[in-house]
Image: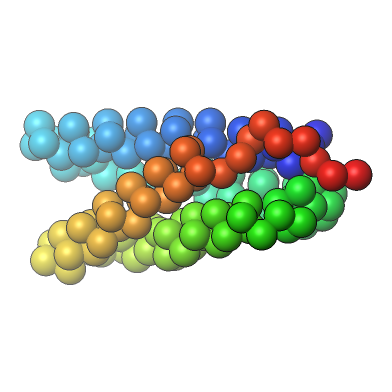
Amino acid sequence: MTGPDVILALKVAVATVSVLLLASLVALWRGDVRLHGRINLAFFALTVAALVAFEVVIRVVDPRLFAYIYGDPALLATLRLHLCFAVPSALLMPVMLYTGLTRRRRLHLILAAVFGILWTATFITGIFFLPHTASPTP
């Protein structure tokens, strides 16, 4: 497994859970709040599982996987930009679930707007800017 393989797998994971997020919004638009919540729970569980799995691979299995990014200042800047959106959106997910489950509607809607912006930026920077074709440096 190489760093670009991990990046490509992350892109697939982000695209997959983004489809779930869109399905959740469709359910909400149709007035099915319960389905919206269930899809969001699946979105949260899959996203956390992917984050944990990839962190284990990156930090434990082979910490040198991203050497090709750390060795290139432009790629490192792109990764840092992506993380500026990805980390806050990941931290906001449990708060969104909490406010949704406790029916704190006003706060939930405000956080939903912030989360929507963060997740859109995470999606765009992750899918379109992170490199998944570069050859890793030995």
Residue 35 location in percent, x, y?
Answer: 24, 36
> Would you say residue 138 is visible in this rendering?
yes
Residue at the image point whose x is 47% and y is 64% from the top: 84
Comparing 51 with 129, the one in front is 129
Residue at the image point whose x is 11% and y is 36% from the top: 29
Q: Quadrant of residue 136?
A: top right
> Which quadrant of the figure contains the C terminus?
top right
Residue 86 location in percent, x, y?
Answer: 47, 56
Residue 133 location in percent, x, y?
Answer: 67, 32
Comparing 57 with 28, the one in front is 57
Q: Quadrant of residue 111?
A: bottom left
Comparing 71 with 92, the one in front is 71
Q: How is the image coloured?
A: rainbow
| Left or right of 137, for residue 117 | left
> Would you say residue 94 is visible in this rendering?
no
| Left or right of 57, for residue 121 | left
Residue at the image point whose x is 35% and y is 34% from the top: 20
Most extreme residue toward the right, as rendered? 138
> Which quadrant of the figure contains the N terminus?
top right
Residue at the image point whose x is 18% and y is 32% from the top: 26
Q: Using the image, determine if residue 23 lies above or below residue 129.
A: above
| Left or right of 55, for residue 93 | left
